Amino acid sequence: MKSNLSRFLIVASLMVGVAGCQKNQQIASLKQQLQSDKPSHRHRAAKVLGEMGPNAEEGVPALIEALKDSDAKVRHYASRSLGRIGPGAKDAAPGLIEALKDRDANVRAAAAQSLGKIGLDTDEAVPPLTDVLKDNDPKVRRAAVMSLGSFGAASRSASPALKNALKDSNREVRDAAAIALKRIGKTDGKRPG
């Protein structure tokens, strides 16, 4: 019986090792694809890294570089994927903050959303996200509001801007602002009549 258990443990250990090697090879391949001349290869690689979630932490430096890609779709997927990786992507904070100024609204929205997911020091994230509440695109404003709400009480300095967002022209932004204010504990979260 002991020999069967030993064999099982050895086989299980080997399988875990093989899976780890395959993951490392896949990430290396995706990082290489992020250097492709073809934008479709680059955006696909950025997207797949995000689908791997926290397991793709090794790909963070390549995704940070992809935030500067000439193709907006690549920048969008890189921004979104960094958020999906989560706290392991904290090094991407400066790049994501810069992406809040991107000319493409999808990139700005993904960057705003990702800043709320990577667990930043709020002193670093709250001021730029608060500035984004003035963005022309409602999906960008909504993403910023949601990220500010995810910080809870730590984003209290954004309360005045969030209260203004209760009057936003977009209902989704208003609703998100009410939720965010409730999470940070500044109001009862009710929108004015």
Image: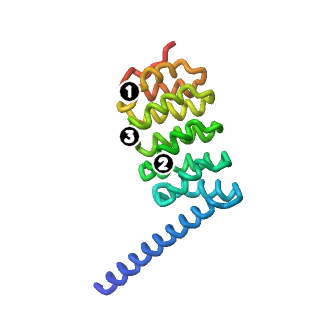
In this picture the colour scheme is rainbow
CB atoms at circles 3 and 1 under 8 Å apart? no
Camera-nearest residue between 3 and 93: 93
The amino acid type found where label 3 is placed reads Asp
In terms of sequence position, does the residue under pointer 3 or pointer 1 come before the other?
Answer: 3
Which residue is depicted at the point 64% across and 54% down? Answer: 43
Q: Secondary structure at mark 1?
A: helix
Circle 2 is placed at which residue position?
92
**What's the mark number on residue 13?**
none
Camera-nearest residue between 65 and 52: 65
Where is residue 104? Give x, y as percent: 65, 38
Return the residue found at the far top: 193
Q: Secondary structure at mark 2?
A: helix
Which residue is depicted at the point 49% across and 26% down? Answer: 177
Circle 3 is placed at which residue position?
121
Q: Secondary structure at mark 3?
A: loop
The amino acid type found where label 1 is placed reads Arg
Which residue is depicted at the point 59% across and 55% down? Answer: 46
Residue 10 vertical placement versus 109 (above, below): below
Which residue is depicted at the point 39% across and 26% down? Answer: 157
The crowd level at tag 2 (other Cα within 10 Å; few <14, some 14-19, many 20+) is: many
Circle 1 is placed at which residue position?
156
Where is residue 18? Give x, y as percent: 47, 75
In terms of sequence position, does the residue under pointer 1 or pointer 2 come before the other?
Answer: 2
The crowd level at tag 1 (other Cα within 10 Å; few <14, some 14-19, many 20+) is: many
Where is residue 152? Give x, y as percent: 38, 33
Residue 68 vertical placement versus 15 (above, below): above
Where is residue 30? Give x, y as percent: 58, 62
CB atoms at circles 2 and 3 under 8 Å apart? no
